[in-house]
Image: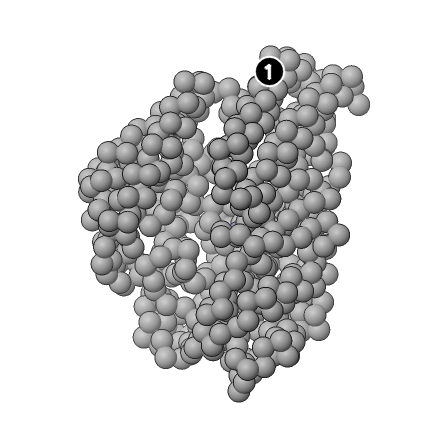
Amino acid sequence: MSDKLKRMKTILAEVTDLSRAAAVLEWDQETYMPPGGVAARSDQLSTLLRLSHVRFTSDEVGRLLSELEEETAGLPYDSYEASVVRVTRRDYDQEHKLSPELITEVARASSTARPVWLKARREGDFKLFAPALEKNVELNRRIADALGYKDRPYDALLDRSEPGMTTDELEAIFAELKKAIVPLIADIARHADAVDDRVLYRGFEPAVQVRYALDVVSKLGYDLERGRQDISAHPFSTSFGPGDVRITTRVSRDFFNECLFGSIHESGHAMYNQGMGDDIDRTPLWGGASPGVHESQSRLWENLVGRSLPFWKHFFPSLRSAFPEPLRGVDDEGFFRAVNRSYPSLIRVEADEVTYNMHVLLRFELETELLEGTLKVSDLPEAWNERVKSYLGINVPNDREGVLQDIHWSSVSFGIFPGYTIGNLVGAQLMEKVRADIPDLEAGFERGEFVALLAWLRKNVHRHGRKFTPNELLERATGRPLTAAPWIAYVRRKYGALYGIKPARI
Ligand code: ZN
């Protein structure tokens, strides 16, 4: 390794340490910090994040990058040296393209809009929020202009979260999804009686749920030597380094799905981080390829594994021993059916596997239209309600359960939503390849063996960290770029069987 690379790695390691120290403080804030700690904590966090930003965007890093680009020009694309230089350059340029004035304005607009959004949502009155949203749309546009784009402003925002992906590409994928899923949702609604999920509401002792969930995720492969589980209002996972990757969960006595599936979801994120190579630690290569790819790991474990029949064939007997009363008279297949009930609903975060992507799709469409000026903020609630009706077949009774439900638009954050759907699609695309490579995969699940799946993900996804863009990673792992086909085939197969929908219709 050259002296220049050594020097850059020293700086990058310090930057990583500062942001990981900030992550410890954030974890504490969400789990154990008393309410009185808020003010001091926000000072500490902003100090750490400012120091990390200043260190990373320094002239020295810029100079080292230019020199190292020459030095590594002849190396293979996927070599460690070339990758560290390429990905650091991408991050460095992104941070430099936004002026300090614009960053300050964005932060101010977000903190001003948040309480306005809360009040508007409480009162179900979109008009209160409209001026703040106008401002946020304008700032999204200015960020897109500052970052630069070839065809469409949304490309710039999308590229920031999902590197290499374009609006046109995503539109084509979403159009395919819409064509396949809207009729499936209508078919499921006609066969709604086929699945009964009342067992999930029979009352499950919270402390036992939390213990059971931790036991399940450790059996899936979440390493407790390098992790732990705590309780928080909104479940999340966070990493302070390869040796300490934590999850949180929440628990409700009256609804079973929240705790177990929340824990499995977060452990999917955490196993991704636990699987990153030690060689890329304390560099910008350490982390998920994108929010969408990160979400693919959580969704894969939560839905494709945790909501599968082989999974429940294995786990149901121990679940019944943990909860003999509420599970009286229920068998593994009945429980598998219950946790997979699908029905159109108003709130995205409560949506099931089939309907979820429609919630994301309509937000993506509305964001691109707002950004490109073909939709006015004042017309947004009407556009929202029309789309919910046409994709999900339900009426929106008020803005609180409609256009005002998500926190996202109260800050300047266009381009984030598509990651949720990309995660579902990537998960299914990877799983299709895993099944081809490991033919007895599901027989293994029935025996409680998940190590083959985890080993495949480690080798093909986890260890690379951010070395490749989402599409590069998918092409290497599955032989093709992002496609909706495997996910569509999966939900048609699974929900066709669950709801007894005739193959001719699906
Ligand atoms: Zn997630």
Looking at the image, is 287 positioned above or below residue 445?
A: above
Residue assigned mark 1: 58
Density class for disc 1 (Cα within 10 Å; few <14, some 14-19, many ≥20) is: few
The picture places residue 137, in percent across and down from the top left corner, at 31, 33
Instruction: Answer whether residue 164 is visible to the viewer in this image.
Output: no
Q: Which quarter of the picture shows residue 369?
A: top left
> Going by the image, does 320 lie left or right of 488?
right
In what quadrant of the picture does the N terminus appear? top right
Looking at the image, is 358 positioned above or below residue 325?
A: above
The picture places residue 224, in percent across and down from the top left corner, at 72, 54
Give whichever of 381, 441 is nearer the camera. Answer: 381
User: At x 42% / y 33%, what residue is drawn?
Assistant: 157
Q: Secondary structure at mark 1?
A: loop
Give whichever of 439, 47 is nearer the camera. Answer: 47
Give whichever of 273, 457 is nearer the camera. Answer: 273
Instruction: Answer whether residue 279 is visible to the viewer in this image.
Output: yes
User: At x 58% / y 77%, what residue is drawn?
Assistant: 323
User: At x 56% / y 43%, what residue is drawn?
Assistant: 33
Q: Type of residue at label 1?
A: Ser
> Going by the image, does 346 lie left or right of 265?
left
Q: Which quarter of the picture shows residue 149?
A: top left
> Going by the image, does 361 lie left or right of 402?
right
The picture places residue 319, in percent across and down from the top left corner, at 61, 75
In what quadrant of the picture does the C terminus appear? bottom left
The picture places residue 91, in percent across and down from the top left corner, at 56, 27
